[in-house]
Image (cartoon, rainbow, N blue to C red):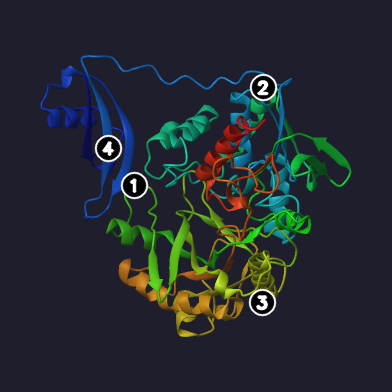
Amino acid sequence: MQKDIEITIAPGDLANEQEINNKLSSALKIAPSNITGYKIFKRSIDARSRNVIYRLQVKVFIGESLPEEAEVIPYTNVADKRAVIIVGAGPAGLFAALQCIENGMKPIVLERGKDVKQRRRDLAMINKEGIVNTESNYCYGEGGAGTYSDGKLYTRSNKRGDINKVLQIFVQHGATDDILIDARPHIGTNKLPHIITAIRETILNAGGEVRFDQKVTDLTVEYGQIRGVVINENETLNADAVILATGHSARDIYTLLNDKGILVEAKPFALGVRIEHPQAIIDAAQYHCDIRSEFLPPAYYSLVEQVGSRGVFSFCMCPGGIIAPCATHKNEIVVNGWSPSKRNNPFANSGTVVQVTLEDVPGTDPLRMMKFQAEIEKTAFEMGGGNLVAPAQRMIDFVEGKLSADLPKNSYLPGTKSVMLKDALPEFVADSLKNALPLFGKKMKGYYTNDAILVGVESRSSSPVRIPRDKETFQHPQVKGLYPCAEGAGYAGGIVSAAIDGVNCANAILNFK
């Protein structure tokens, strides 16, 4: 017999199997000896009262043994099968490649950047010297932006595909099985490179290809049908199916499509700052304590406020995290955040952004939102003074319109410069943030404080361009065999939803002859 049940347990008892067994037997009103095993399938923190607890959803086995663990997904050799070109080795591209192999097709993954090992050197140059390699950085390279920006696997994409399968594939390639049960699963930037490398090895061992330093500079199209791609302006690679999984920062791809007369559309996005607090402030607010228990992870938050007709919201919240410089071109400032697996840094940061609508940037140019985004990033660079030094301001000073006399210690390695941050942002964005931040402070004790720093600009929350596709076939309406995919096409946000979209595109190719 099997029973699904929810129990609560103190954080200090989370690893105590005997205590969990006693809780289960009490809730089911059976002797502990009758329980032959249990499996936790969801775990979440409930911090609504002063006594913080874990809620566990458990499948209990009574008088029968636990089933065997799920078998790993087999990947058979596809070296001599139909080729599918996949542009981009982020989560969408890699999971599309794995699904192609499952479907009996050979993936050829083209990545403009470097593999994870070589990429580390370029990230060190960004952080230490303020030098951006425009082909290998926090956004470009093996694993995409997700590899070095945290590995949060939380998603609401329940109807888009099999979330559990995506998580199982991560586990199969080295992630801990905690991600299968945590309500907000997280891998950590320090662990992701090894997992991404393992996924690459799976693709190669099955006869697929993964090529680095392979920038797609043109598409070959004949009579409305994709025929292949041009790499680094001198090599043509042929295929009748191309998955375009380039991420939301590949401005050259949007420009290429537009110049070739292939339809792209302006898309709303969000713009703002990255806000960092001492982690202890967030812990105290969320866990109702002076000092966080050693049995609890660093606390996170999620905040949203409607200011007039605009939404202001936090996203990509990184407990125990670091603010990272994520520019992809020279003379621009872009900030993002990440956390290691232990989330043991002393700061907590979150993107805090304002909705930018198509009406905010008038015109008919399909790339106008992208150009608007780029101008904001250039302004931020100029205000920082160069070398990726970011413009910044204390929170209350920003709201009250005061130049900060100094800035708090923070995690942004290239450095910060005290400025009037409103001058780095469109007026409607600055005003919306000024109105929202005190309201966030009313929702979360301690949030509204001058111990918090605002660092500009958080501008890559999503793509400012959409590459349209048919809802049924996933193909571009003008080019058969071209499959716009995931964040770069405007159809996903985050690692898991991008991975699912990659899987869906690979499956759609099966129906294309």
Which residue is the site of mark 2?
A: 206
Q: How crowded is mark 1: few (under 14 residues within 10 Å), some or many (20 or more)?
A: some
Res. 369 image quadrant: bottom right
Which residue is the site of mark 1?
A: 296
Res. 256 image quadrant: bottom right
Q: Which residue is at the front of the view, 238 or 11?
A: 238
Disc 1 residue type (three-letter): Leu
Q: In the rendered image, is residue 158 in sight?
A: yes
Local SS, label 4: strand
Q: How crowded is mark 2: few (under 14 residues within 10 Å), some or many (20 or more)?
A: some
Local SS, label 2: loop
Q: Are marks 2 and 4 in contact (CB under 8 Å)?
A: no
Q: Which residue lies furthest to the front in this view?
A: 223
Disc 3 residue type (three-letter): Met
Which residue is the site of mark 4?
A: 56
Q: In the rendered image, is residue 449 in sight?
A: no
Whole-Å distance between the Cαs marked 4 and 1? 15 Å
Looking at the rendered image, the disc whose residue lies closer to the viewer, 1 or 2, is 2
Q: Which residue is at the front of the view, 99 or 71?
A: 99
Q: Residues within 10 Å of mark 3 (few under 14, many from 20)?
A: many
Which sits earlier in the primary sequence, circle 3 or circle 4?
A: 4
Local SS, label 3: helix
Image quadrant containing the N terminus: top left
Q: Which mark is on residue 383?
A: 3
In the image, residue 3 lies at what x, y percent? 21, 26
Whole-Å distance between the Cαs marked 1 and 2? 41 Å
